[in-house]
Amino acid sequence: MAGPEAMRRAMADYVRTVHEAYRARAAGLPPAVRARMPLFAGPFTVAAAGVQSLHVIATREALPEPVGPEVALDDALGELRWTLRFFDPVVLPPLGLVDETRGPAGAEVRRTLGISTHLYHLVVNPGAELGPHHAGHAGTGLANAHAAAAQDYETLRRLAPAGLVDELEGAWVAGLPVAHALVASALAPDDPALAELAREPRPDPTTVRRTLLGALRERA
């Protein structure tokens, strides 16, 4: 079994490869789209939390300085700059109470870390999934999703009040799906599909965004 230092190195390499793939995919996009992709907006923190699964959570929320056995690693790729923090039940005992016997408990892990907003949340299994192949696919997929969203929000600004669309995009960037759905419903208050999505406990932001686009295009 790999020791703590080897696991930290593997996780640092995984995160860097994710960001390399994200940056490479973004390089071919129009400058305005690239500028609106969340990871390019400034420095962020990546929390690597080990439960039964490994959770990799990027956030712009401030975390306290490392104390005791905590470890932090700074890294950068061009305009991408991040600090990688490591958490496990030794460093943060409440993580040991998170139950993942039925699958990854992402929301509970974020609550345990005190993270309320996030730029991305990846879940990987120790071993092969920490390799470059999986990381590259994760980074490319993340960039594609962020680029598609950025383009959709630009389209929405042409169809609806820009200020409300800014709030909609802000809720998406922050990882607040309920707030995102509520703003979308306010932009198209007579759309029953959006009203139904806004009542869900955790609506899918992509579904909400595309439903809103369809509703506003029908009106245009």
Image (tube, helix red, strand yellow):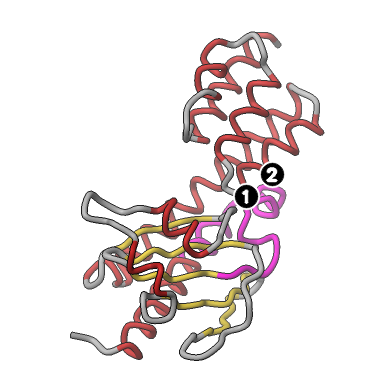
Residue 35, above or below 158: below
Residue 185, above or below 23: above
Left or right: residue 201 versus residue 138 is: right
Residue under label 2: 170
Q: Position of residue 102 (x, y in %)?
A: 22, 49
Residue under label 1: 174
Three-letter amino acid code at the position of disc 2: Gly
Residue segment shown in magenta: 21-45
Residue furthest out toward the left: 1
At numbered mark 2, what does the secondary structure look like: helix, strand or loop? helix
At numbered mark 1, what does the secondary structure look like: helix, strand or loop? loop
Q: Is residue 42 magenta?
A: yes
Residue 198, above or below 76: above
Q: Position of residue 201 (x, y in %)?
A: 47, 32
Residue neighbourhood size for the residue with mark 1, other residues' Cα within 10 Å, grouped as few (<14), some (14–19), many (≥20): some
Q: Position of residue 54 (x, y in %)?
A: 34, 66
Q: Nearer the viewer, residue 14 or 199?
A: 199
Q: Position of residue 75 (x, y in %)?
A: 56, 81
Residue name at image x 58 percent, y 70 percent: 45
Report how far apart the C-alphas of labels 2 and 1 lie in the structure: 6 Å
Left or right: residue 216 versus residue 198 is: right
Disc number placed over residue 87 in the picture, else none: none
Residue 196, above or below 23: above
Residue neighbourhood size for the residue with mark 2, other residues' Cα within 10 Å, grouped as few (<14), some (14–19), many (≥20): some
Three-letter amino acid code at the position of disc 1: Ala
CB-based contact (under 8 Å), mark 2 and mark 1: yes
Q: Is residue 52 magenta?
A: no
Q: Nearer the viewer, residue 24 or 132?
A: 132
